[in-house]
Image (cartoon, rainbow, N blue to C red):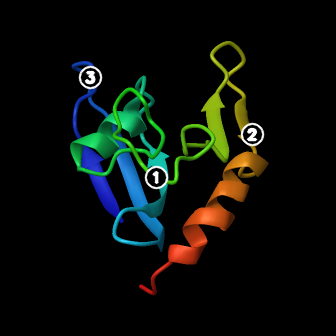
Amino acid sequence: MKVIDRPVGGRRAVTHVEVRERFDDRATLVACRLETGRTHQIRLHMVEVGTPVIGDARYGRPFAPAPPRMALHATRLGFVHPTTGAALAFESAWPADLQKWLTETMWRNKVTQ
């Protein structure tokens, strides 16, 4: 697990990054857990460590084969409701369009860790 603790927009921002799968020498599937929630935090932190999000037209670089959209997805989201104080949690599976791209283009280039 790598911890990236670098400001975003002048405010403290912390992202925990865990490698899930390595493909060829150009791509790695990671899971990110945020301690803070800054705008574009994951995208900016990944660029700062030299591994931009694939398909990120703003902060990334060209990648082939290109995904159908930015290869970034929140599978879990949780926060405390600002009015009621209730803990809220939501889950969303990896989307079909990105799964198809990952299966058809990236898994064939998977390397053993």
Q: Amino acid at mark 1?
A: Ala
> Upstream in the sequence, badge 1 or badge 2?
1
Q: Disc 3 or disc 1, which is closer to the eye?
A: 1
Q: Residues within 10 Å of mark 3 (few under 14, many from 20)?
A: few
The residue at which mark 2 appears reads as: 90
Q: Which residue corresponds to the image point at 63% horizontal and 28% vertical from the top-left? A: 80
Q: Identify whether 23 is placed above or below 66.
A: below
Task: Tell me the tag on residue 64.
Answer: 1
Q: Nearer the viewer, residue 53 or 16?
A: 53
Asked which secondary structure carries label 3, the reply is loop
Residue identifier under label 3: 11
Q: CA distance from mark 3 to mark 1?
A: 34 Å
Does residue 30 sit above or below 61 in this rendering? below
x 34%, y 70%: residue:
25
- Amino acid marked by disc 3: Arg
Q: Quadrant where the N terminus lies? A: bottom left
Query: The residue under label 2 is which amino acid type?
Result: Phe
Q: Which mark is residue 15?
A: none
Disc 1 is placed on an element classified as loop
Image location of residue 32, percent across then percent down? 47, 51
C-alpha distance separating marks 2 and 3: 26 Å
**x and y percentages locating residue 107 in the rendered image:** 59, 72
Q: Secondary structure at mark 2?
A: strand
Q: Is residue 75 visible?
A: yes
- How packed mark 1 is, by other alpha carbons closer than 10 Å (few <14, some 14-19, many 20 or more), is few
